[in-house]
Image (spheres, grey):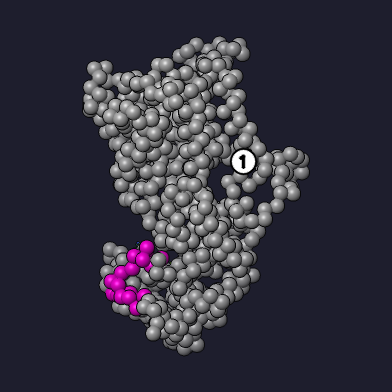
């Protein structure tokens, strides 16, 4: 009843081409932003903010990155974690060399390094697809992870191999390092994610996004229409890796606050991001958030939520149940609904739009 | 004086000379030559496996013939390349619909405008100012094509959900969005019912007359070929066996033999 576009007429192509043409969607977005910027930071506990919200934001950004490559351009990648790692280590080196440049700028610049590495490992994609490309990106994963361990220059010759996140400030407020409060770190993450999501949405709704999807759906036809396959695929690798790289830098600097990064950026993380994209919805921006929200909150729900409502689950069992649940969902979505939670969301909205009359 | 690269009506727009194409031991095309004149509808007919689709693939650079030359708008090449063909004004539709299944009708047709859009990456990031102006400008052109082919009602529908006949029409729309000088249609009416066929015939004629687009058409329905085309080239087993007006070709003994027993 309330979710309707009746009476909202579009009088220009500009209005029709808006990302959210329906008024209710725009209101919904405003409410979400309000909650994200006001409600959560002021009413959420430190635990919720640092153990649920920040991971959710970091994963969302990485999932958007992978979705651009896999969901929108149809190029499968198992090297997501490695590209995230490139961002993290690049950021560490950059802030070592340029301690006076603002860390937020450096986090974004680290994405460019990741983009360059992504393009390099994307080169084979002109010749190979599907399974073989997955194997090629897997090689990237192992090679880069090997570098993270074996090239001591990357972690400033620290004996333990760990990254030590230095304190960096913005307007004299610490945003990284031990003194940075969860709320500040959350705000930085949120700001980056909002702006980068807006950019991604713009790209995907224009010429470049259409070229990516054209290559995904029918590369022959795309090529014969003058879309250059190599350029288009490499651009997808670059943008995708940029997002992953920024997510990786955020992960170490704003979430973990340091540690043995080489272990973090493992193949397991690559798979986790891939699962988020599959469960959330291949080829959907909002799906990236759904998938990240689901997988980022699942461990917490299993560990604290279920016991709270009286279902006793010991730590190890909870972990096993999580594994099985995710596995089952992956199979379910791959077989039944490749567009994931995002499609279920769409169907729900469509039902609402016509409710209470089915036609 | 004409600008270089433009061809006046009735002159040769495309010439294929002594083209041969092999796949390992399979000879798909053997020493075929023919030309297409600016403004005409040129039919390519022949039994299944005669090499018609392969010929289109050579013309727009998807296959590389081992021998021969291809001249388009006065420029002679050993072989075409897909990007060159597209940017020089060759568009096509496919025998088995090759739409972008996950995209809406509108986005499919907009994708046809890709080569004409040139706002760079950073404007695209903002989707504002010049990038938005460009998007709107091209949307207008696309809406005209949508109007022309009467597919307004399926504008926002993902093409994978459309019935076959409409998919073929969207594919034509996408090719038209490139504003091609030469349009290659590979069996545009295959698998359609009578009414859809009649619509498609009318669209092809309208495209040819309103936009002056030169058309090369592969079609099995002899009635359609006779009605639409100005000249016909007939292939059999990869060789050219006849070339001329529909009437002349229809009376050619080799053509009659080739089609003997084939119910068309
Ligand atoms: N990519 C390919 N690889 C191998 N053989 C091919 C290929 N494309 C076409 N052929 C062969 O070339 C011949 C002509 O095919 P085609 O051009 O599709 O015929 P038509 O369109 O006239 O039915 C057939 O024998 C076909 O098997
Ligand atoms: Mg064919």
Give the SS element for disc 1: helix
Pick the front one: B33 or A119: A119
Pick the front one: A175 or B27: A175
**Residue B79 in magenta stretch:** yes
B173 sits left or right of B249 in the view: right
Pick the front one: B115 or A341: B115
A346 relative to B203, above or below: above
**Residue B39 in magenta stretch:** no
B67 relative to A224, above or below: below
Which residue: 44% across, 61% down?
B115
Image quadrant holding the N terminus of chain A, namely: top right
Which residue: 61% across, 36% down?
A29
A50 relative to B264, above or below: above
The residue tagged 1 is: A346
Residue A239 appears in the rendering: yes
Q: In the image, which residues are magenta?
A: B68-86
Residue B256 appears in the rendering: no
Pick the front one: A38 or B187: A38
């Amino acid at each position: 009843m309330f979710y309707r576009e009746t009476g909202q007429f579009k009088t220009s192509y500009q209005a029709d081409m808006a990302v959210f043409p329906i008024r209710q969607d725009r209101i919904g977005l405003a409410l979400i932003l309000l909650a994200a910027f006001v409600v959560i930071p002021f009413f959420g506990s430190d635990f919720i903010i640092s153990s649920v919200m920040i991971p959710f934001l970091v994963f969302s950004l990485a999932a958007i990155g992978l979705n651009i490559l896999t969901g929108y351009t149809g190029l499968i990648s198992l090297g997501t974690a490695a590209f995230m790692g490139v961002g993290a280590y690049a950021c560490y080196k950059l802030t070592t060399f340029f301690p006076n440049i603002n860390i937020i700028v450096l986090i974004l610049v680290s994405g460019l390094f990741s983009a360059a590495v992504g393009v390099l490992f994307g080169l084979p994609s002109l010749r190979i697809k599907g399974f073989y490309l997955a194997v090629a990106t897997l090689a990237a994963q192992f090679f880069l992870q090997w570098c993270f361990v074996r090239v001591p220059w990357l972690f400033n010759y620290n004996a333990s191999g760990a990254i030590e996140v230095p304190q960096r400030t913005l307007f004299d407020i610490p945003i990284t390092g031990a003194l940075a409060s969860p709320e500040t770190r959350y705000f930085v993450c949120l700001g980056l994610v909002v702006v980068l999501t807006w950019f991604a949405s713009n790209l995907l709704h224009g010429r470049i996004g259409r070229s990516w999807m054209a290559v995904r759906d029918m590369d022959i036809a795309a090529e014969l229409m003058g879309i250059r396959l190599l350029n288009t695929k490499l651009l997808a690798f670059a943008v995708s890796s940029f997002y992953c790289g920024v997510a990786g830098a955020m992960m170490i600097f704003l979430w973990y606050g340091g540690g043995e990064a080489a272990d973090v950026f493992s193949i397991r993380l690559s798979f986790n991001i891939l699962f988020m994209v599959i469960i959330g919805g291949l080829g959907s921006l909002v799906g990236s958030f759904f998938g990240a929200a689901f997988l980022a909150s699942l461990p917490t729900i299993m560990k604290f939520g279920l016991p709270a409502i009286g279902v006793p689950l010991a730590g190890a069992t909870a972990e096993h149940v999580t594994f099985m649940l995710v596995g089952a969902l992956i199979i379910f979505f791959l077989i039944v609904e490749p567009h994931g939670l995002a499609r279920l969301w769409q169907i729900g909205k469509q039902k609402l739009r016509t409710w209470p009359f089915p036609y | 004086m004409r600008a270089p690269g433009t061809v006046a009506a009735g002159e040769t727009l495309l010439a294929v000379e002594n083209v041969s194409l092999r796949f390992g031991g399979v000879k798909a095309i053997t020493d075929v030559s023919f030309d297409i004149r600016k403004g005409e509808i040129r039919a390519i007919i022949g039994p299944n496996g005669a090499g018609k689709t392969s010929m289109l693939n050579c013309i727009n650079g998807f296959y590389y013939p081992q021998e021969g030359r291809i001249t388009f708008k006065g420029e002679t090449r050993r072989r075409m390349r897909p990007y060159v063909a597209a940017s020089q004004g060759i568009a096509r539709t496919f025998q088995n619909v090759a739409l972008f299944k996950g995209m809406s009708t509108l986005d499919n047709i907009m994708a046809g405008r890709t080569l004409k859009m040139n706002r760079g990456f950073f404007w695209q990031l903002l989707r504002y100012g010049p990038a938005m102006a460009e998007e709107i400008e091209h949307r207008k052109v696309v809406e005209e094509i949508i109007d022309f082919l009467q597919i307004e009602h399926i504008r926002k529908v993902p093409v994978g959900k459309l019935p076959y006949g409409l998919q073929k029409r969207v594919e034509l729309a996408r090719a038209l969005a490139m504003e091609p000088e030469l349009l290659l249609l590979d069996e545009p009416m295959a698998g359609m019912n009578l009414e859809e066929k009649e619509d498609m015939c009318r669209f092809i004629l309208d495209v040819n007359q309103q936009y002056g687009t030169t058309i090369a058409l592969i079609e099995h329905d002899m009635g359609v070929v006779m009605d639409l085309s100005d000249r016909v080239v007939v292939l059999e087993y990869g060789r050219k066996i006849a070339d001329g007006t529909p009437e002349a070709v229809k009376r050619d003994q080799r053509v009659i033999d080739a089609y003997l027993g084939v119910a068309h």
